[in-house]
């Protein structure tokens, strides 16, 4: 049986915020950005990660790459526990895992040429600059749809979509196995989004890539993903194949997200029209007791306020954290 390429088990990230004040008398409080998240990604698949802004999606993506350190839990990459690896060992692992950021301009050094930007990961990992490196950069730029003459230019000379292609080339130059796409198309025009998504899919087929695709646009996620994980206030509340998420969602929050899909997908809107998410997402500093969604849920029960539901498998490959699914039928 094929083992997951990436696994998270009980992953948590807490930030201390506030504190200080006059004479340091104001205590700091704990913000639970990611709270007890367990998930896995199989080789060659795309796992979409969706949820409202502030739910912890990007923090989780950075945790999985250990760009920030977890407060608790474990991370395994290709069967190896990387949770506590030192800097040297982690650098070797990072050849196999890279990230494409949301802002295609802010992620690129404006003082560096495209050649230097794309070649930088090779140099960091010990490959000397020279003609061989230039050939690799030229070939990678061609692979992402940019001409060789782009090598001598600077990021400000390109459009947003072209800059994101540069970011993708930089992420792929080390030939990684896993790419975290952190809102990689949300800053682009719709037509350019489609081009970048198609490019990512082509690269996945050619290079055998595995993606964690973080986004808030469910129509894009539906197009690119094999499975979808839905996140709310630091926790994963539903995971399933995209057909199940879009065709038969179980969690009330997932149903509300599907109902919010734009009118270009009328079939989705008609299925979710009766479900609306009321109110705003609560603060992660002081999350609700029990189920974190109970303050906005149209089906809230007393148990929802008292006990957090576990993420349980209700059908093969379909997990949901909701007390409604724990009630026996009939």
Image (tube, rainbow, N blue to C red):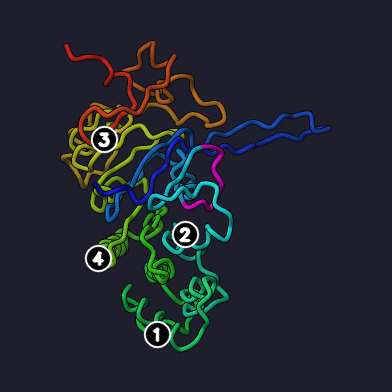
Could you tell me residue 13's position as x and y percent? Answer: 54, 39
Q: Dot 1 surroundings within 10 Å: few (below 14), some, or many (20 or more)? A: few
Q: Please say if 278 is above or below 51.
A: above
Whichever of callouts 1 and 4 sits on the residue coming sooner in the sequence is 1
> Is 23 situated above or below 297?
below
Q: Is label 2 or label 3 in front?
A: 2
Dot 1: element: helix
**Mark 3 packing: few (<14 Cα in 10 Å), some, or many (20+)?**
many
Q: Give whichever of discs 2 and 3 has the lower sequence position.
A: 2
Q: Give the mark, 2 or 1, whose residue is nearer the N terminus.
A: 2
- Element class at badge 3: helix
Q: Which residue is mark 2?
A: 93
Q: Which residue: 20% across, 37% down?
A: 244
Q: Which mark is residue 227?
A: none
Query: Where residue 194 appears, x then y in whole percent?
Result: 27, 61
Where, by quadrant of the figure, is residue 14 drawn?
top right
**SS at mark 4 in the image:** helix
Q: CA distance from mark 3 to mark 1?
A: 48 Å
Residue on which the image places disc 3: 259
Q: Which mark is residue 135?
A: 1
Q: What residue span does the magenta drawing correspond to? A: 65-72
- Labels 2 and 3 touching (C-beta < 8 A): no
Closer to the eye: label 2 or 1: 2
Question: Residue tagged by mark 4?
Answer: 202
User: Dots 2 and 1: beta carbons under 8 Å?
Assistant: no
Q: Single out the mark in the foreground, 3 or 1.
A: 1
Q: Which badge, 3 or 4, is on the more N-terminal residue?
A: 4
Q: Main secondary structure of the magenta part?
A: loop
CB within 8 Å, label 3 to label 1: no
């Amino acid at each position: 049986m094929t083992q997951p390429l990436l696994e998270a088990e009980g992953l948590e990230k807490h930030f201390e915020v506030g504190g200080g004040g006059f004479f340091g008398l104001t205590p700091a409080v704990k913000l639970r950005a990611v709270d007890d998240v367990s998930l896995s990604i199989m080789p060659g698949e795309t796992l979409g990660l969706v949820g409202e802004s502030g739910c912890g999606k990007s923090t989780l993506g950075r945790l999985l790459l250990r760009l920030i350190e977890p407060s608790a839990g474990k991370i395994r990459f290709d069967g190896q526990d990387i949770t506590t690896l030192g800097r040297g060992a982690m650098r070797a692992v990072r050849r196999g895992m890279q990230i494409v950021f949301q802002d295609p301009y802010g992620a690129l050094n404006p003082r560096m040429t495209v050649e230097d930007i794309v070649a930088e990961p090779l140099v960091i990992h010990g490959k000397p600059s020279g003609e061989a490196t230039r050939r690799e950069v030229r070939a990678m730029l061609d692979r992402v749809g940019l001409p060789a003459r782009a090598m001598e230019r600077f990021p400000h000379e390109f459009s947003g979509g072209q800059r994101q292609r540069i970011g993708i080339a930089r992420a792929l130059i080390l030939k990684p196995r896993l790419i975290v796409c952190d809102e990689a198309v949300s800053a682009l025009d719709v037509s350019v989004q489609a081009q970048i998504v198609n490019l990512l899919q082509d690269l996945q087929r050619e290079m055998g890539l595995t993606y964690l695709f973080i986004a808030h646009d469910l129509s894009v996620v539906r197009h690119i993903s094999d499975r979808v994980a839905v996140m709310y206030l630091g926790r994963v509340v539903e995971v399933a194949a995209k057909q199940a998420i879009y065709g038969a969602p179980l969690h009330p929050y997932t149903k509300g997200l599907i109902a919010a899909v734009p009118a270009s997908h009328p079939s989705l809107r008609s299925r979710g029209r009766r479900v609306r998410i009321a109110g705003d997402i609560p603060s992660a500093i002081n999350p609700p007791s029990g189920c974190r969604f109970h303050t906005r849920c149209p089906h809230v029960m007393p148990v929802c306020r008292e006990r957090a539901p576990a993420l349980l498998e209700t059908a093969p490959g379909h997990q949901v954290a909701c007390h409604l699914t724990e009630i026996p039928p009939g």
